[in-house]
Image (cartoon, rainbow, N blue to C red):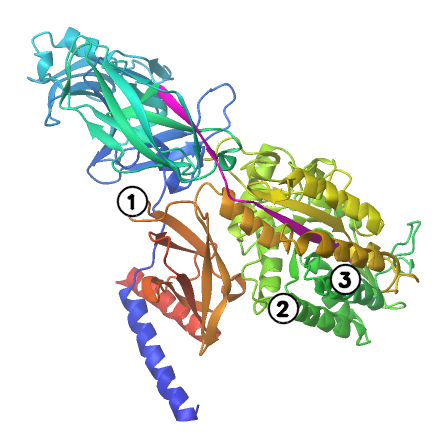
Amino acid sequence: MRSYEILQRGGWILRSLLIVVLVTGCSRNPAQPVAGLTALKPEAAQQWGLPKYIKMEGPGNEYRVLTHQRSGSGDGDWLELAAGEQGQIEYFQTVSAAGGEGIYRLQFLSTQGTGRIKVSALSAAGQEIGTVGWVYTGPLSPPDSATKWLDMRYQTNYQGGWLTARPNLAQIIAREWPQLDLKQVAAYRLAVEAGQGQHVMIARFKTKSPGIRLQPRQSAYATVLGDTVNLQTEVKNMTGQPIYRPVFTLMEPEGYGLVAKGQTSQTLDVLAPGEKRILTWKVKAQRPDLVNGGKPWLVHFTANGEALDGQIAVTVSDPRPGKIYYVMTEDLEPIDAAGYPKAWGNQDGWLEPQELYVQLVEKSEALNQIANKYGAKWTHYIAWTAIKAAEWAEGQSTSHEWTAMVTAMKKSVQTQSTYGHEYAVHLHSDYDPDLQGNFLSYNPAVDGFWANHLKHGWAHVVSAEGNFNDNNSRTGLLYKYKKILDKLEANSGQGDIITARAGSFDFGSGSADEAMSVRAYHKVGLWGSSDADGNNGGLTAGDYGREIYLTKPDDIDHSATDLSRTGLVEFRPTPRRFIAYDKDSAAAMNAKADAGMERFTDKGTVKPGVHAIIGFTHAMFVMGNGDWHSLSGGQFQAIQDHLHYLKEHYVKQGTLVFATASELVKAYLDYYTPRPVVVYGPIKSSGSGMTEYKLQVLGRDIPIDAGHAHAVTVKYPLYLRDSAYKISIQKNGKTIYSTWGLPTPFNDVAFTLNDGQAVYTMKVYHNRWIYRLVETLRDVKAKLLKIF
């Protein structure tokens, strides 16, 4: 392109950017009231039915969901209401007129302002036709034709505490409003109000109606994937009053195992006292119950939004053959071997360029070359922190050997990843030259360095969760090194690398610690871990059948038991005495793989689901026939013989698939994830400062259509964080979402999936200078807004 064309295009871009920045706003997080507890993300409000069950008047009102560590409370997360000085905020729940009951546990936090609890009778039009309320703080309002207030106000400022009750709403209204014709009552409402600066903390607050009984005509069904089955339920009015226009709703189970065919809700005109009706629901067996941990899918029902006791269990078998993946993993890191009984290095007590070159570059490439012959793939969990230490040593050295070693390592990752081999994060934090508390020592006599290998982990070295900008945090370290590897593997055709292994399996121990690490993994786009039990000093390997699972959000050692609370995909080397490439003979490795194939097949057919046979080693431990420099014979030959055996006995027959760890985790998520997961795939096209990525939607049996639209996020590549200035999401080639608001906090771009047959892609526009210009213009606009 000629220079004047570049100037013309640059002028057009500058003008466009100026317009965009001036017409788009700078988003700010609204100020949150401080309650001494931890605020959860906005989506946590859904469990409280927000904002549907909130009414607000006047300015300054806020609400949020908080988590706490109050021992003995017996409650989950809490809801806080905070009223503005001139504002009023109300949280409410509504129940049908069939003898509803309320349950609450709450406390008011301020001496001033309005604090009230009230019960209201509602007409069919939703109007309050009779209300009784209890005033705990603030003025006592005079009664009127439809409202009666009872004085419960505190007399001192040290009497506050939890208010707990289970009021019968119908009885309260009947007692306080005897003149009210209860036939006019369609529903009851339980509400808590805060006004004029009052705060209220709510631990429990709900309504329940014992007025309707639901009984399944058949409590259990056995289906095959794709079947449609009719579920029949009997509903009965258990009260002495007619129930007008009750709405019965079938609740599809978490994880989309069953989906309704047709409407999920049915409305009756009236259900007379004692009357029974039969309701029929048609559902499709959408996903195998393997997704639900092998347990039946449970169908629940509600009446007017209230949960009913009856449930139906549906098993769903999967007639499709499953897949068995063979995954070769190794931790790619250096060793000097001083003090060890075996000379894996030169044993002089220093890490030198030749050791890193042989162990990290030559050995990994030799292993890759063997795998290439059979279509196998290695996942190298590389301690790039050691490469950072090598770059630090490069600055101390007068030779050029460290420069050559670092260059060779980068080239190796770039080249070898194009053959399908994966290089993923392995955080041995002790090597990081920028981490507080670390020590790196350089010895010019041997041109070597050393670190504090008693800080060889991750979670115990960095205790803060942090963010991308904090190198001294779990999130910051993951971001730093995943960003490097993402860039080196950008043209590998593999898409996002979504697994990592903590140094020394140091993922963290205990629910709070592990939950922090899971969040840090998700922040950088990681979905897979291989540290279970090793994080507590145990053996990470697992028996076949327990080799891969969805974890809890705060416990990687055990499978999730609730599909609404999941964490990562955990995969373990197999079997319990795992395939060890550095010491097992070919015959031993073959026998261990045979045991896995026998476990996962039935009469030559792979059992449904996703299964894995996973080997493990360190490349530095794999020895040839000679000393630590040797790259042939010995274990290299054993690995080659083993892969030859697998290829001839299983791969050619189509019962075994060679894969990387990320491919395994993506396949597992595709089958088992309870909700769609979107990751970026290979580059579709690139040029002129724009790169388009294919998007992989994982969750193959999850319905994605107009009736099942999903709000999702996808990460854009971490290495583009400092240059991406615009992103658009494409659906079948048409833009459905676009943003200039970059970078997002954790590289997430949100959009809606509503068509399972569509092709989704992501276009990332990136240029470091344009990015900086947008940042500058945004800052200028913010300053101008402050002035004017």
Q: Amino acid at mark 1?
A: Gly
Q: Mark on residue 707?
A: 1
Tag 3 near tag 1, CB within 8 Å: no
Q: Nearer the viewer, residue 613 or 201?
A: 613
Q: Which residue is mark 2?
A: 418
**SS at mark 1?**
loop
The x and y percentages for residue 514 are: 60, 38
Highlighted magenta segment, given as a residue range: 310-334
Q: Mark on residue 85?
A: none
Q: Nearer the viewer, residue 546 or 618?
A: 546
From the image, give the main secondary structure of the stretch colored magenta. Answer: strand
Q: Amino acid at mark 2?
A: Thr
Q: Which residue is mark 3?
A: 367
Q: Amino acid at mark 3?
A: Leu
**SS at mark 3?**
helix
Residue 671 shown left or right of residue 285 in the figure: right
Q: Is residue 106 above or below residue 414?
A: above
Spatial separation of the CA atoms under disc 2 and disc 1: 40 Å
Residue 766 in the magenta stretch? The answer is no
Q: Quadrant of residue 258?
A: top left
Q: Would residue 190 be seen by someone viewing this image from the given angle?
A: no
Q: Quadrant of residue 733?
A: bottom left
Q: Residue at x 37, y 52 (%)?
A: 756
